[in-house]
Image (cartoon, grey):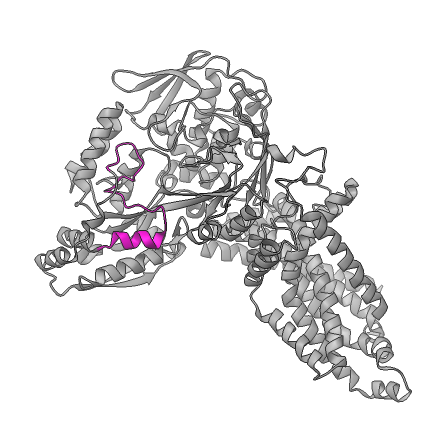
Amino acid sequence: MEKLQFVGRRILYLIVMMLGVATLVFLLSKMIGDPISANLSQRALSDPQIVEAYKAKYGLDEPLGTQYYLYMKNLLHLDLGTSVRTNTPVLGELKRCFPATVELAFTAILFASLFGILFGIISARRRNSLTDQCVRAISVTGVSVPGFWLALLALYFLYYKHAIFPGPGRLSNQFLAPRHVTGMFVLDSLLEGNVDKALNAFGHLLLPGLVLAAFTMGLITRTTRSNLLDVMGTDYVRTARAKGLSEGALIRKHAIGNAIIPVLTVIGLGLGNMLGGMVLVETIFNWPGVGQYAYQSVMSADFPAIIGVSLLIALNYMVINTVVDILYGIIDPRVRCQ
Amino acid sequence: MKKALALLLVLLLALALVACGSSSQAPASSGDSEADAAPANTTVVVAFGGGFDTLDPGYTYERNPPMVINACYENLFKFYSNEGAPEPCLVDTYEFSEDNMKLTLTLKDGITFASGNPMTSEDVRFSLMRVKNLKGNPSFICDTIASIDTPDEKTVVLNLTQPDSAILSKLTYASCAVLDSVLAKEHGATDAEDAATADTAQAYLNNNSLGSGMYILTSYVPDSEIVLEKNPNYWGTPTNVDKYIIQIQPDSNTQMMTLKTGDIDIACNMSDDTMAELAGLDNIALLSSASKTVGFIMMNLDEQYGGPVSDPLVQQAIRKAVDYAGVQTICGEGTSTPYSLLQTGFMGAKGERPVDYTDVEAAKALMAEAGYPDGFSIDMPVCDLDMEGILLTDLAQKVKSDLAQINIDVNIVPYPWAAGYGDEYRNGTLGFTVMYWATDYTDPNVQLEFLAGGIVGLRAQWTAENDPEIAAYYQKITNATDNAERTALLEEMQEKTYEHGPFLMIAQAPVHLGYNTRLDGVAFSDPYVVDLTQVNLK
């Protein structure tokens, strides 16, 4: 019963937040951009008939209150409206570009988590050694270097100069895109039974995945290291050490469980951030994800699309936070008891 | 946990190695591993920038989609080369009426759409009226078409609202591509007056083509990729390229790298820097050429806005003070400086402004004559746009340094387009600025908007009333359907505006293109970027 109440509260909170986000973004997009001048050419703008037709087509000739009412009414029917830039349903466009972002974001967060936790543990175990200094330098670099610059460097050296990784895009040209099932090329290729294509698609994920992972990996490394060091200094660890446990077993059995909880929060935030799309990295790697879509939408003051992307990002964070909360409970029994 | 982590890492590494190995084959030259893909050696991969949202000809307005439209559809007329006048494509013969108010066109025999349907005059009428009634960005192209008659299946009569010497060029425009009207109607297209709201074919036409062109559109993933395959029912003579994959790569560095590695064959949006990186390679050919996009200085004629630059003597001093060769250096190889209001390459263009036109001493004398021997200070609002990749702020900096030599202290004021620059520019309340103009369609008449009373002319408060002689050229040139007569008038107009008026054209922006030398017939095209129907594999 308590669990049901928890889930119910979460869903209610989600709905209220989504409506709030939609309202806020609707008002902001109306205040800062004019979709008519952003989407009509200078010639078209000088023709009142064209301007009127455009307004009528997208309901922009209605008073703001009516526009808001109609938008929210459609939203409650899960209709995100029609893009004033592309004249196609926003929901369909998000279905097209979100899987590309999901595929990339999950690859990146996998790299970030694996390397980040590993580096964090190594760094904590060899505190103040040369290894620790090197790992800390790598993590600080990862956090500090702008993603787009790292993307350019990675593409230049690892694709262009040394051909270690495949180039931009989701698939090499000799392959046709797999039939759309999930929209994620690796999975869809496997569902098609084409392992070569799946491997090719996975290969294309590696370089942008590593570039995107750099920032979050740096954070995870630093968080893991500092939390592990904190935990290693506590009384119960000292007691375990006194019992004669090896350092490895100590970390594995007693320390890492407690140290990992704040890391989960960092992973969750990192994933939420990546699922919102990374405009410049997507542009450089020619990756048709949410970031590029959001950028184009903002430039065109395409308010249905902007609201659609904002709701998607809000939903991502809500879902990820819920999952992180559940994982807290799995890892730490004290959270379960609460 | 440690073992599991290590195992996962090893697995991931192994998978990555396999994936990298399988992906590192050069797709354009390697054998094809898939039965459903065209043989790689007859597939050509092209990269161009994004910034467009539709492949429906009725809404096509941006720069890059005409490459696709031109490959999949055909127009009544076409530019087969980048210089000169449009030539008949679907049209066999054409004739203007004596009063130039009617254009009668006879279609060629034996033209079929990709569907196999024969092309008739009704298809032409439907396609043009749809563009007009959709009331979208390109609808202006049909402004001078009042109605269309189709007396028989092969004859089309355009009834014009006024004589229009640019009508043949307008009919080459991507939006005027002829659609298979039978199929278009089946998918929701309409040419009715309420087409702006009633037409529902855009979604279909974004993913399918309904033309008679050499290729058919088989796939379009926005912001990613377009695939064209050969039209099996093509009525003309096709090239030997079976398939085009057009990748949308907004970044010129990415285009440079993918061209060099062989992942693409044609890079349409190279920059001056990326061209230098590829110079000297045996398998890459490079082209730099002046586009029709032109950067200009605008000096408002209304003293209320322009202040001292509204004075014709000051305007002439500015003309003499600008270092045109230096502007060309900033913009890169391929840049040219138009003689006057008409870009080089257009029919009737008088070429370039002489390199030795700059004369700082003469400019200083003009300033003294105008009553400003010690110069003056003036604000120059500049917006955040770029002209074919060249920032307007960079151009403004150059103008500022040139004008400093004649004691004009230019204070550059950054003014984003969306934050009000756009409105002020259109309303004609900007006093002194650097801006650019990208042509709507490939015809010298687009430049008539810069004349007194034209759309752009009015932005500098250059009204027909205060300069009737210049304003009269608008109508005279529009009425001149005879090319020789139009050329003579255009030349006259350029002479009259060479040292007169509120506009100074300072640079025609360059375009840079690189391609693999396995291809033949690659050339820059103003209307189509690259005319894919003229590209062959060697």
- A21 is within the stretch colored magenta: no
> How many labels sit on residues?
0
Q: Nearer the viewer, residue B277 or B256?
A: B277
The quadrant holding residue B92 is top left
* Residue A221 on image: x %, y %: 70, 73
* Residue A260 on image: x %, y %: 77, 73
Q: Nearer the viewer, residue B195 or B481?
A: B481
- B337 is within the stretch colored magenta: yes
**Farthest right residue in view:** A243
Residue at image coords 60%, 71%: A141
Relative side of A34 to B222, left or right:
left
Q: Nearer the viewer, residue B50 or B158?
A: B50
Highlighted range, magenta: B322-350
**Predominant secondary structure, magenta span:** loop
Q: Is residue B416 above or below residue A128?
A: above
Residue at image coords 20%, 42%: B463
Relative side of B489 to B517, left or right:
left
* Residue B113 on image: x %, y %: 54, 20
Q: Nearer the viewer, residue A196 or A295?
A: A196
* Residue B138 on image: x %, y %: 42, 35
